[in-house]
Image (cartoon, grey):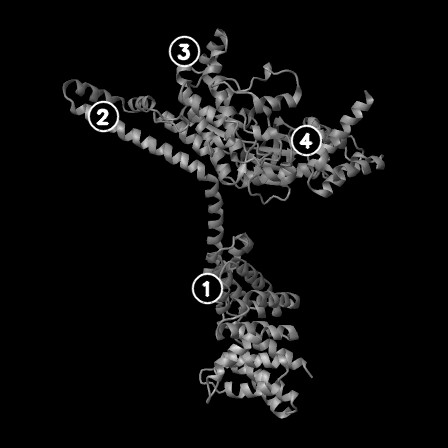
Amino acid sequence: MESSLNQEVDTLIFETALSLEDESLRQEFLKRTFKDDPKGQDRMERLLESAGEATSFFLEAREARDQLAGGLVGELPQRPAVADDPSTTVELGATIGDYRLLRCLGSGGSGNVYEAEQAHPVKRRVALKIFHLDTESVLAKARFDIERQALAIMDHPNIAKVLDVGGFHNGNPYFVLELVEGIPITRYCDENKLDIRQRIELFIQVCDAIQHAHSKRIIHRDIKPSNVLVGGSGNQRVTKVIDFSIAKAVVADYKVQPLITGHDQFIGTPAYMSPEQVEMIGIDIDTRSDVYSLGVLFYELLTSATPLDFHKLPNSGMSGIRKAILDNQYLKPSTRLGEFSASEAQAIADARGTDPVRLLSSIKGDLDWIVMKALDKDRNARYETANALMLDLKRHLDNKPVAARKPNGLYTFTKFVRRNRVPFFSALAAILSILFGFGTSTTLYLREKAALKEQERLSLEAERSRDQELRLRRQAQSRANVSYAAFLLGEGKVSEADELLQLNPLVSIEPSKEASSVFRTLGNWYATYDRWSEAVECYRLMAQATKMNRAEEILRGTDLLVTAPALLKLGDNIGYEKFRQETLARHLPVSDSLQAEHILKACLITKASPQMLQQLEGAAALCEKQINEYVEGPFPAWEGLSLSLYYYRKGNFAKVIEIGQRTIFSPNIREICAAALRVLMAVSHRELGNLEESKAGLESARSIIRKPRVDNTNEEKAIFPKWYDWEIASLLLAEAEKTP
């Protein structure tokens, strides 16, 4: 018996440790658990290393994991339970900040809620929630932070508002909410004998509040009657959704979120939890889980019972509840009503201001379909959003066909009659005397039937393409954001572009032809203002986006010319060498002098090996062929520069001077091209012993290359054209100045 118990304890410790993805938290848990048993800790650590093979052995003990972890850690002397700490008890009448405690409204695992009175700056009554926050409990801190931040970002009349946040003298945090004078929605509806329509109208407020939370990327995860309070009467009835302490952020900024939504963590109220919440196999919980919980709440508003009758389940603990939620087929609300005894059915009907027969008739049909769609165990078959559920309920109240029910002719016709009672019966009376009325109503009916068929077709089509649409939407939004940033840079709106880029990292864009232009523009802007790290990253992504382009198309453009100097200006000599090898492997042999000029200029900014120079012989020959067509007069400028650079790297300095002297007088030569040529010729003169000419040539080149090109003090910054030619010349000059 003792051996069996030890095995179960080991199993639960293993499951708990495995669920902690953060290594430091896992080590802290193991250290505390095995404080006096280092051998046991070593054994458990080895077991965790082979978790992939061992996990299935322990799955049966999963339901008790959280309870064991709390017990084990709570019993340790270093971490006394919060309940034993007298500092967590606050006497009524005590003052915390600007608030005097009047009475305790409720108490839970995370803290107490008090009614309090605020004296200034305004006099009002509020709800003050004090958290039992052990300073070592990262989980408690996380829950406080999650609820505070979730409530703070929401602004909706049906969600309790955060008014203030503070800290108690003993370190326990609190926040102040508007005081909700109300009772749970199910109790309110029964005590006030609200009929089905009035209950639906109240429930629509709840759906609207949950949809607002979802729009702020918050999933409530604990929707139940006690977290939906109702106050007021008549047309002044107002619902308030409360308690976001176990909420989850869909795209969270909260660094502590994984502690709240860890793998396999059983969080929520079982009767209202969705199958994916209780299944605990790593499925990401999304907004459709709240749709399921709304379905359970609506089921209870209709029938005074939840879909799963826990009283009929065998006493098998949480595993039995989980199995029932996953496997049991729920009865429709109208069917469930039929299973109550006569006295129970009468009591339920009395609470709704009607009799059992009329209650059954009002629920059967549309409301059955709506509830069962919200409760579908396959979340892909549920309503996509709380808003979709709310719209279907509004269609029901307006006697329109609901989306939850597959349309058919009789159903459509019945809805049409209910929605158009007066026109329909007037037309029916006219039919008895003239046939024109029949044609009118038939036309209306056929139009609506055709519209419903089209709606059904579009619904099926949307269902098939939903995942694709979401993926494309994310890609499109990301591309649009970064494209807009590039546009802002082109307009000189630097601060706006920087802010946008902080929110939308470049790596979030998938490579495409369109994206390559964005990366190129951003890279050139960064390069213009010496932000080389960002420029190189842009050019790396640009290269990925153009990987499928034809090699000659890339070589005729400027992609190689911008990447080469950017790598060297960043100081990434290894990256430049790798770039040269990849460029030669992909783009050789070249087919015209433009390609030859570009590849020579991109690959020979620094010294090259004899093997590389041999690989570039063909490109150099094309450039030489081009300039040899000019028997007399100056050579073409850029071909002359690239060919001079080739001979310069080969050490043929006389040839450099010969080509340079004819190229320098080209009528269309650019200033920076001439400066680069003067650097090559000056070094060649020095190597041949002509020191005076060398010195004069370097001075002339330096005066051009080193002059300011852009005004960094001007906020309206633009991209400097042909910046790469200037940087190549600058790199050649720097090399010449280092050479003795």
N-terminal label among 2 and 1: 2
Residues tagged 1 and 3 counted as in contact (Cβ below 8 A): no
Q: Which residue position holds label 2?
A: 441
Q: CA distance from mark 2 to mark 1?
A: 61 Å
* In the image, residue 485 above or below residue 568: above
Which amino acid, by three-letter code, is at mark 2? Ser
Q: Position of residue 166 (x, y in %)?
A: 62, 40
Residue 596 showing in the rendered view: yes
Dot 2, crowdedness within 10 Å: few (<14), some or many (≥20)? some
Which amino acid, by three-letter code, is at mark 1? Gly
> Mark 2, mark 1: which one is toward the viewer?
2
Which amino acid, by three-letter code, is at mark 3? Val
Residues tagged 4 and 2 counted as in contact (Cβ below 8 A): no
| Secondary-structure class at tag 3 | helix
Residues tagged 2 and 1 counted as in contact (Cβ below 8 A): no
Q: Which residue position holds label 4?
A: 90
Dot 4, crowdedness within 10 Å: few (<14), some or many (≥20)? some
N-terminal label among 4 and 1: 4
Q: CA distance from mark 4 to mark 1?
A: 60 Å
Q: Which residue position holds label 1?
A: 490
Dot 1, crowdedness within 10 Å: few (<14), some or many (≥20)? some
Determine which of the numbered discs, if any, sits on residue 357 in the image.
3
* In the image, residue 292 above or below residue 249: above
